[in-house]
Structure formats: structure tokens, C-alpha cells
Image: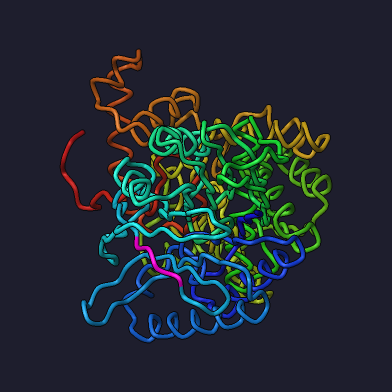
Amino acid sequence: MRAALAQINPVVGDLNFNTKKIIDATRECVKQDVSLLVTPELSLTGYPPEDLMLRKEFLSEVEHKLETLAAAVGKEAPNLTIVIGHPCFKAQENLLYNSASVFRGCKFLGRYSKLELPNYEVFDERRYFASDGGPLVFECNQISFGINICEDIWFPRAPSLTRAAGADVLIVLNASPFQTNKDNERKQKVRKHVSSLNLPVLFCNVVGGQDELVFDGNSFVLDRNGDISASAPEFEESVLIVDLDDFGNPKKNNSFPKKTHSTEQIFDALVLGTRDYGLKNDYNKVLVGLSGGIDSAVTLAIAAHAFGRDSVKAVFMKTKYTSAESIIDAKECARSVGVNFVEEEIDIYVDLFKKRLSKEVTSKLVGLAEENIQSRIRGLILMAISNNERRLLLTTGNKSELAVGYCTLYGDMSGGFAVLKDVYKTQVYKLATYLNSVADSLIPESIIKKPPSAELRHNQKDEDTLPDYETLDGILYRIIDKNETFEQIVGHGFEKELVEDVFKLMRKAEFKRRQAPPGVKVSEHAFGRDWRYPISNKFVF
């Protein structure tokens, strides 16, 4: 028999759109003589629906749409067995479950509800769902299939219960978000908890961006020995079709080659996450403030890949502190990426602002206050263009800067989406090198080689205020991603006083991070959904 995994990109809350996606997949199955179709976790609603699941009218509409979908599939493909992920509200219990329903034609065959509910990092499922996990086994073409949902296979309990109930093959519906090396980790968990039970696995993962999360797809099929029989592409929609023998073991099929370099994966994740954030919020044009520096150059290239170069506008805003090199670099970058480029001199606005404020409102503006006026005027200009031209403004700051507060509220932090929010400065340089390896000189070498600077005063360099980025990122990675203690970090050879300074800068910058736009999560621990430190906090790390 033939089975298919529908690796689709749903839109959270758009039940009509998601229903159409699933029906389109059933039509493909009819063409390919498929007997069983699997959709991802919560495929009907998109993942995660968050507090939509607290709205009774939403849950009522989900039930109605599930019935409509089952009827439509029954009409399109009466002999097709389909597994649909959806939330299931049981009024008599007043409980909500993360479920998967099985239909053949219009006939309801059974329902499975998730046993293991993740409640860490970006996951908050215990806020919404009750745990069930009673096994469900159904037959299709005389093969017994069991169902688990995502987190279930990260532990031995649910797969063991399903195997004991008589399953020959395990179906796993997933909404497993991307982070570097996550695909390998998924396969290792499946082999540990499922392949050890001598069960083949049909692992169907969702794809696409949803706010700060991006889902990479990477659906796969494992045989009884835990070897890959088939796999779907990364970061794109696909219907993966696999042949099973009479005992449910998958036959070897073509697999898509996987990207082995983490920088390439991060780039693809950033492109998909940025594109989907824009399109799912009704933006098809974007805006980038171009400075001549590495961050804005890489952001611009990602924007062009995500939306097409004709949909991207770059704005360069120079002052008396802007170097001649930055002017040349910004123009050359916009030309090589191939986007619309405009420039504006802002000294007249800065001078008027400083003069008026100093005369009427406060004392003479000096130091950081004077520097930040430049950044905030740039933010004001960009937001005006964004409003006027209905463009999504992409901020250009990176994870290193956001960690230590080297960014200006209502200035360079202004915007709707922070593309590099989870990308360290040293990773930004790797992205630039990668881009130049696949598109010759997309990022001018002069941008890559020059010392980074905010150019808010004469001869300013980032390293006047911060340690070099290799050192800073080494400390930040251990604090943020690895959650290491002060003593552990010093034990790696970093200077004690420097580590103390970085901890202090991070604590003081929490209020900025809380006000930052969302951005794509690509690391183990990103600022946003899985970073919840108090702003008012006197604990010394």
C-alpha cells in the first residue's frame, strides 16, 4: 500500500485556508493511488494557536470545520484513510485535547489525544490541553497503524502503549520547530523510543513560519531498524509518498538531500520565517534601513530572497558622522542585491531637534542622549515610509547587541520584525560569507572587513564599548544558550571582570528586549517565547 505525509504550511486560525491545503493533498493522493494520508499536528488550526484555544467560538468553528473537511474528503477520495490533527474540546469534561482524528471517506474511525504535553522553552501546552494518551490502533489495507503526537515520541511511554495495543506501524504527527541540529535530535529520539520496539515510523512535520517560530518540515520515514526510507525537503511544502510492504515496512524511496552546514540552514530558516511573517500579516513589501554595515547588508539580502528584490526598499540616512566608506558600501550593497535605494541627509532634523529640545524642554543634549536622537530620527523616517507605503519595516539588530543593550529603543529597534534577533554577530559574518559563496559578491567585501560601528560620533567603533565579538559571543552563548553559571564561564578561560560586566549589561537590557519586535528563533534559546526573566530584578548572576 501507499502512504503519504502532507508536509503543509498552514496559517494559524485560517480554518478555510488550512482545509483547502488538506483537500489539495487528498487530490494528490488520489492521483498517486495512496491509501493513507497523514497531516501534521494541529494541521486544521495551525500551530500554535495559543489563546485562540480559550475562545469557545473558535473551538466550535473547529468542530464544524472538521465535519466539513471529513465530508469533503469523503467526496473527493471515498477510499482514502486520512489522519487530521486538531484541538478537541470535550464539553462533558470541560477539557481540551491535542488530538488526531482518523476518517475513511466520511466514516469516523477513531481519535487519539496527546499524552506528553511539553511545557518548556517555546512550548506552553499545559496551559491549554489535558493529557490523555489512551492508544488508538486502526487498520488500513490489513496493516495496523497507531498514532502518537510530537512530544509523545520523546519519551518511551506513548510508543510502548501503542505497540502493546497491536500497532504494526507508528504514525507521528508533529509541529516541531527548527533550531540548529534539531532534525538529527528528532531522529535519535525516534530510534531510541520507537525503533527499539521494532516499529516503522511515518513522521509528518509541519513547515512554515509562525511569529517567532519557524518549522523546517523534514518529514521522514524510518523502517523497523531505524534506517531512513524516505524524507521530505527542508523548509518547503511537500507530499511525501512512500510504499509499504504487506507487513507495514517501508520500501526504500528517494530522499531529498539534507543541508549539512548549519549556516545554510539558518539562512533558509530566516528567509522562510521572514517571508511567512510578512505574508501571513498581509505584507508583500518590506523596508530596510541600510547603514553600510554588516547587519543591515545581511538583512537586506534575506529580505530580497524572502520577498523578491522588486518588493524591497533600502533607505540610507547619513549624518556628519557617516564615513565615506559607509556611503560607498551602502550604495554598492543595494546595487548588488538589486533593490530600490534612496538616501536622505538627516543632520538638519538632528540639529533642529537638539536646538529646540535644549531651548524649550531640557538642558543641552550631550553624550548618549545626543547619539540616540540620530537613531530615533532614523526610526521616525523609516516608520513614516512604512506607514505611507504599507511596507513591513525589518529591524537589523543582532542577538549580541540585543543581549547587552547595544541598541536604541524607538530608534534602530523600531520596526515590525527583527530578522537577526536570534543570530549572534559572529554568525552574521558567517551568513555574509555563505551568501557570497552562492551569489558572487552579494555582500561587498569591504563591509565584511571593516570594523563594526554605529557611526553616531566621530571615529566610533563597537569595540570602544564592547569586547571583541568573538569573545563577547563566546560568553553570551554560554549564558543564553547553555545556561552556564558564572564560575563555569570563567572556567572556560574568560576574564572574571569581563564576564561580570557582560552579566550586568544583560540584566540592565532586559527592558529593551521586552519591547523588541519578534524575530525568527534558530538557536537552542532565543529571546522571546523561551526567555522570561523579570525586568525588575536585583539577583546577581
Tell me if 341 is positioned left or right of 459 in this view.
Answer: right
Whether residue 174 is visible here, answered yes or no, is no
Spot occupied by residue 464 in the image (x, y as percentages of width and height): 47, 29
Q: Name the one closer to the observer, 89 or 496.
A: 89
Q: Name the one closer to the observer, 276 or 141.
A: 141
Question: Where is 329 relative to 93, above or below?
Answer: above
Please report the residue visible at 64 percent of the width from the left and 68 percent of the height from the top.
Answer: 279
Q: Name the one closer to the observer, 450 or 109.
A: 109
Whether residue 295 is visible here, answered yes or no, is yes
Spot occupied by residue 101 in the image (x, y as percentages of width and height): 45, 69
Please report the residue visible at 20 percent of the width from the left and 52 percent of the height from the top.
Answer: 536
Question: Where is 531 relative to 109, above or below?
Answer: above
User: How many labels sit on residues?
Assistant: 0
Spot occupied by residue 520 in the image (x, y as percentages of width and height): 52, 51
Quarter of the picture containing the C terminus is top left
Please give the range of residues in magenta: 109-113
Q: How is the image coloured?
A: rainbow
Q: Quadrant of residue 25?
A: bottom right
Magenta highlight: main SS: strand
Quarter of the picture containing the N terminus is bottom right
Tell me if 232 is positioned left or right of 71 in this view.
Answer: right
Q: Quadrant of residue 264?
A: top right
Q: Quadrant of residue 440?
A: top right
Question: Where is 267 relative to 529, above or below?
Answer: above
Please report the residue visible at 47 percent of the width from the left and 47 percent of the height from the top.
Answer: 168
Q: Based on the picture, tell me whether residue 117 belongs to the magenta stretch.
A: no
Q: Based on the picture, tell me whether residue 111 belongs to the magenta stretch.
A: yes
Q: Name the one closer to the observer, 425 or 224.
A: 224
Spot occupied by residue 210 in the image (x, y as percentages of width and height): 51, 61
Tell me if 530 is positioned left or right of 523 in this view.
Answer: left
